[in-house]
Image (spheres, grey):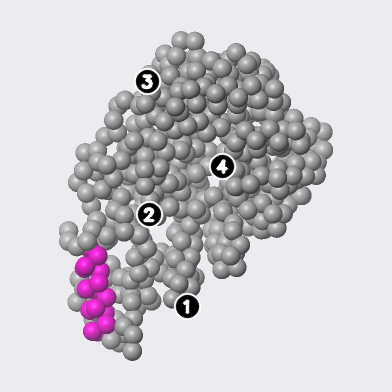
Amino acid sequence: MAYDFSLLHSFTINDTYIVMDINSGIVHSLSKEAWDFFKAWEKADGDAREAVTELAEVYDSEELKGIHQEMEVLKQEGMLFSYDEALDKYELPEETVVKALCLHVAHDCNLRCTYCFAGTGNFGSERGLMSLETGKQALEFLFKACGPRKHIEIDYFGGEPLLNFEVVQELVHYGKARAATLGKELKQTLTTNAILLDREKIDFLINEDVYMILSIDGRPNVHNRMRPFSGNKESYPLVHKAIKDYVNQQEGDTYFVRGTYTHHNLDFSEDVKYLIDQGFTQLSLEPVVAAPNEDYALKEEDLQLLGEQYEKLAEMLFEYHCRSKNVTYFHYNITLDKGPCLPKRLTGCGAGHEYLAVSPKGDLYPCHQFMGQEEFKIGNLTQGISNLTIGKGFRKAHVLNKEKCRDCWARFLCSGGCHANAHNFNGNIFEPYRIGCEIQKKRLECAIYLQVKKWEYNSLENIK
Amino acid sequence: MAVKVHIKTLNKEVLTQTLQSGGCGECVTSCQSACKTSCTVSNQSCLKK
């Protein structure tokens, strides 16, 4: 077929008309005339004359022919209707190296978040802290397993990692020293609920270049409802103060404030706005993932409203951009040029082969979401990876091998979604979680829309 | 009168061309679960570029 429109994704948001060429990743912003021509062309199954005739009473035919010509040029340049046969045959290389570890330094927590996937921090097992010895063993495992990779990562995770702060301190120092000796670039991150984030810890984490992921859900009542202490006591005042102290002290945007929205705050753009108003300019709010019977779970019927919220959020972020207010909303920070290569987009999160989670006792799992599930245990720090089958299975679960992803327009942007969500909802890492997919696609459309709006705004500003 | 531009193309880098040139693996890991700041791979940058 000369014109396969399934190779394109077209959508419109608020009088902005966008066509994305899926395989090349090229994004085009169309005038209203060009959009109408494009849709008529699509309806006519690629017959341009029929499309021009269809629109003859609305637009000047010569102008429509000019638009058609522009599109033909883009097609010839590989930026419209592009297809590469190499995609049909492409297989990711079998060999892989571990380049990131999630260290569960504490299987315990001081909050009782309703939606926590880790139980109350213990992942359905006994509570416990990682010893310094096990932590060092994990770092040495990474330094060895990463092979020639220069850039490697450690995330101090839990439960709540600050419950084991002395060990974290030692490991941060140890990791930095060993990385320097070995010529590696080690990025260290800590994910925390901020309850124990006092002045001393803030000083340490900033001085040692530890990136921070800080959890707060937004407006006080929203946060307190889902992230209380035991006994349902509110945690917001402590959390807010600690994060504010950290953000005020740090320089260079070494953090992300992250939260979770649920069925109880479907107007979550208000929470984003609230967090920005608090001075938190690097942020993201995530959709909760929960069993359908939970009252806070997102439902199919919420999707319409959530879509509107994402559009509202894009408008809000565009307004900040026009006012030169520097705000980074993680999911809208899409990289159109200089983005990841296609092999990376097929690799996705790398769980099970590039990225592993380490339990406090030193057992290895594909990622933190699979922590404690015996059937997914792939080895331990002493013996290394003993079950290679699991990692290979995860590596094969990429968008070209998943039926529902293969023909999805967003396949090279999202990389197929979270394996754990697929497993939990469908019992199969090859079948993605539907509500997650729908949210993801809307989020990506809004991210592209925001890029188009910023690009057009910046172009106009440059002309002035 | 200025000629109206009907199609504006935002980016020029053709993704499929990176099938052969990419894959060095030096980029940041991208978790997609909601408990971390889940990121689609598309919002990452390539360290080589």
- Nearer to me, A210 or A346: A210
Tell me the element at label 3.
helix
Work out whether residue A254 can be spotted.
Answer: yes
Residue ID for mark 3: A389
Chain at numbered mark 2: A
Does A123 appear above or below A59? above
Does A54 appear above or below A80? below
Residue ID for mark 4: B37
Image location of residue B30, percent across then percent down: 47, 39
Residue extent of the magenta highlight: A61-75
Residue ID for mark 1: A464
| Marks 3 and 4 belong to one chain | no
Q: In the current view of this chain or complex, which residue is farthest to the left?
A: A1
Distance CA(mark 1)–CA(mark 3)? 59 Å
Mark 3 vs mark 2: give the one in front.
2
Residue type at numbered disc 3: Thr
Image location of residue A328, percent across then percent down: 56, 54
Does A406 appear above or below A14? above
| Marks 4 and 2 belong to one chain | no
Q: In the current view of this chain or complex, which residue is farthest to the top?
A: A383
Q: What residue is shown at x 34% (from left), y 31% (from top)? A: A396
Mark 4 vs mark 1: give the one in front.
1
Left or right of B20: which side holds A122? right
Q: What residue is shown at x 60% (from left), y 13% (from top)? A: A133
Chain at numbered mark 3: A
Residue ID for mark 2: A337
